[in-house]
Image (tube, rainbow, N blue to C red):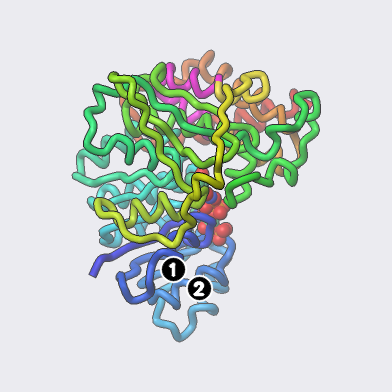
């Protein structure tokens, strides 16, 4: 039977993944979560997982208690997450949020598992490393971010050399119609509401700031290997087209579907086959129109930063990702304003560029982790200057 593991099983992508898996139809090896130990235990028991891992050491007793008598092993902490990724599995969903997803993803690739990659931070902070490890171990990475799944599907059977450009769409997020001068005072609650997608809090706020789209531009470069000047983002408020690929004969291939992550997850789960999925079908007559507009770079400075990172390469993605995560933490804690997030990330990039910390020909895990920690420290040190 097929063996699967889900990292970040208690989150939005993780729960959507489990929604597509029938208990008993696969062998579930590992399910992991963070603080939501009750959900983790419920799912581990329902799927008869070998092991359930919480990222938090101090929740191990709660997890053990919730799993008592079930036969599911309980474990906790970073080392246990890595160990769970060492357990042989055919298909591993990487849906931990943040850079914490990098190590388990790399470990799964080292065992030749197919990695369904939702954790975009891995590609942004260590794209070349991830791709090199996958190639070395004959492992496959399948994109789960809906835009990249759409590009992947549009490219099926095509010669990448015939691609003129890739366009990923952006809804514009929860604050897209808020006047520019009111953005500064947007609260985490306002930014954490999305007009089309139902996602975790962090990615929803990143959608409002377009840091999410900035990450996806970088992901596109890292995953597909296209030059930065061939990759762009466009605002498409309905979120029905997820991405478009333009070829050298002028043909533009678009991927459309309802905004439901189970599309992209199901595609990665069943690839290379397609299988029926319980997602809404589009009624084009009802849709009637599709709108597009160019993103306003004054409103969305994160997109400019993505361009800098794609052009710069080296460790700039690791700095960008960590500074962005730190800025998001500070915004959620109400210690900086919404518009300060992009200012802070730019200052961290500039500071570490000035100190020569972005240069690297070949990325190693140690380099990425050290740079990640340095960028977070720098962000916290520079944040008080913003207020
Ligand atoms: P959620 O916040 O909903 O879930 C995150 C998961 O990671 C949870 O299982 C959470 O556990 C766990 N977790 C949190 N912190 C840690 C940690 N330090 N170590 C280990 N596990 C941890 O996030 P999403 O599901 O929204 O997103 C997951 C990833 O997928 C992100 O990288 C996101 O950018 C990407 N993505 C998400 C999409 C979406 O529709 N949501 C779309 C495309 C990509 P717990 O909840 O138990 O604390």
Q: In the figure, is residue 153 to the left or right of 61? A: left
Q: Which residue is mark 1?
A: 52
Type of secondary structure dominating the magenta stretch? helix
Q: Is any part of residue 359 visible from this angle?
A: no
Disc marking residue 140: none
Q: Residue at x 48, y 38 (%)?
A: 241
Residue 252: give x, y in percent of width and height: 37, 27
Q: Residue at x 28, y 52 (%)?
A: 271
Q: Is any part of residue 137 visible from this angle?
A: yes
Question: Where, by quadrant of the figure, is residue 122 drawn?
Answer: top left
Residue 51: give x, y in percent of width and height: 39, 70
Q: Which residues are magenta?
A: 304-323
Q: Residue at x 53, y 20 (%)?
A: 352
**Does the stretch in magenta take in 92?**
no
Furthest residue in direction bottom, as rendered: 69
The answer to whether mark 1 and mark 2 are in CB contact below 8 A is: yes
């Amino acid at each position: 039977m097929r063996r699967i593991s889900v990292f970040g099983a208690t989150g939005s992508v993780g729960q959507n993944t489990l929604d597509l898996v029938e208990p008993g139809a696969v062998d579930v090896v590992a399910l992991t979560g963070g603080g939501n130990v009750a959900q983790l235990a419920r799912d581990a028991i329902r799927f008869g997982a070998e092991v359930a891992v919480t990222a938090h050491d101090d929740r191990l007793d709660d997890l053990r208690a919730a799993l008592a008598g079930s036969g599911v092993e309980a474990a906790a902490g970073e080392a246990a997450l890595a160990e769970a990724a060492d357990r042989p599995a055919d298909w591993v969903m990487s849906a931990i949020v943040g850079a914490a997803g990098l190590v388990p993803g790399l470990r799964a690739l080292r065992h030749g598992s197919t990695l369904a990659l939702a954790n975009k931070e891995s590609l942004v902070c260590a794209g070349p490393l991830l791709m090199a490890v996958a190639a070395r171990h004959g492992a496959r990475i399948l994109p789960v971010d809906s835009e990249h799944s759409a590009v992947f599907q549009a490219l099926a059977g095509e010669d990448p050399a015939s691609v003129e450009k890739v366009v990923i769409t952006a809804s514009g997020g929860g604050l897209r119609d808020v006047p520019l001068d009111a953005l500064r005072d947007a609260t985490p609650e306002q930014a954490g509401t999305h007009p089309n997608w139902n996602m975790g809090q962090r990615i929803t706020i990143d959608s409002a700031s377009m840091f999410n789209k900035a990450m996806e531009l970088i992901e596109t470069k890292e995953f597909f290997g296209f030059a930065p000047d061939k990759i762009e983002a466009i605002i498409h408020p309905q979120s029905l087209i997820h991405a478009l690929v333009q070829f050298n004969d002028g043909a533009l291939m678009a991927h459309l579907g309802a905004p439901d992550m189970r599309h992209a997850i199901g595609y990665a789960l069943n690839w290379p086959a397609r299988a029926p999925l319980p997602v809404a079908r589009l009624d084009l007559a009802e849709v009637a129109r599709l709108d597009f507009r160019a993103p306003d770079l004054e409103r969305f400075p994160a997109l400019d930063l993505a361009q800098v990172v794609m052009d710069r390469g080296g460790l700039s993605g690791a700095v960008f990702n960590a500074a962005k995560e730190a800025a998001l933490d500070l915004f959620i804690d109400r210690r900086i304003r919404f518009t300060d997030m992009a200012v802070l990330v730019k200052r961290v990039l500039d500071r570490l560029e000035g100190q020569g910390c972005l240069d690297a020909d070949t990325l190693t895990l140690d380099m990425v982790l050290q740079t990640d920690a340095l960028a977070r420290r720098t962000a916290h040190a520079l944040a008080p200057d913003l207020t």
